[in-house]
Image (cartoon, rainbow, N blue to C red):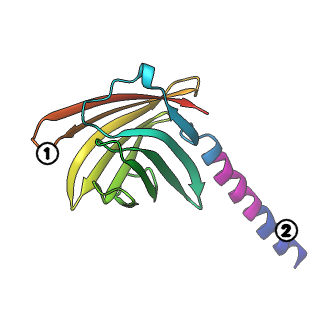
Amino acid sequence: MNAAIRTVGMTLALFFVAAVGTFAADANLGTWKLNEGKSTLAAGAAKNSTVMYETAGDSIKVTIDGTDAKGAVTHSEWTGKFDGHDYAVTGDPTSDMRSYTRIGKNTLNFAVMSAGKVGMTGRILIAGNGKTRTVTSTSTDAMGAKLTSTAVFDKQ
């Protein structure tokens, strides 16, 4: 009986350490603040001022605070995995689903959708030193014009 309990306890401990180690190694985790001086945002594009990545069970929660194209305050949340599947977004009137796909240790691709239609795509690249995050995104405005933005964030 004692050996079985020790085996179960060790298995759970190893699982916990592996899970924590996986998230701890994720360079995206933490709070990122927009560095407007280093960013090139498209005219009429929304501005994400602060982006926070945190663990949520076996998923990642992304909280974004910023302003829309008209300057109104925005707040959205997404919880999911970096597995390319669509997960629901709350608080964003311009999208209802988002997906992230891990491309490498420090690189993610993403797609933002509304009613099944992709409205924005992009790539997130964390610098090797883990201190900056560059988000390059492409979208189309209401008039059909292509908008490209490069937002640089500093880790807080």
**How many numbered markers are drawn?**
2
User: In this rendering, is residue 58 above or below 106?
Assistant: below
Disc number placed over residue 6 in the picture, else none: 2
Q: Residue at the location (30% across, 57% down)?
A: 93
User: In this rendering, is residue 149 above or below 118?
Assistant: above
User: In this rendering, is residue 123 above or below 21?
Assistant: above
Foreground pick, 132 / 83: 132
Q: Is residue 7 found left or right of 88 in the rendered image?
A: right
Q: x, y (%) of residue 62?
A: 49, 51
Dot 1, crowdedness within 10 Å: few (<14), some or many (≥20)?
few
Q: Do the residues labelled 2 and 1 touch (CB within 8 Å)?
A: no
Q: Residue at the location (35% across, 52% down)?
A: 99
Tell me which segment is drawn in magenta: 11-22
Furthest residue toward right: 2
Q: Is mark 2 on a helix, strand or loop?
A: helix
Q: Main secondary structure of the magenta part?
A: helix
Comes first in the chain, label 2 or label 1: 2
Q: Can residue 128 be found in the magenta stretch?
A: no
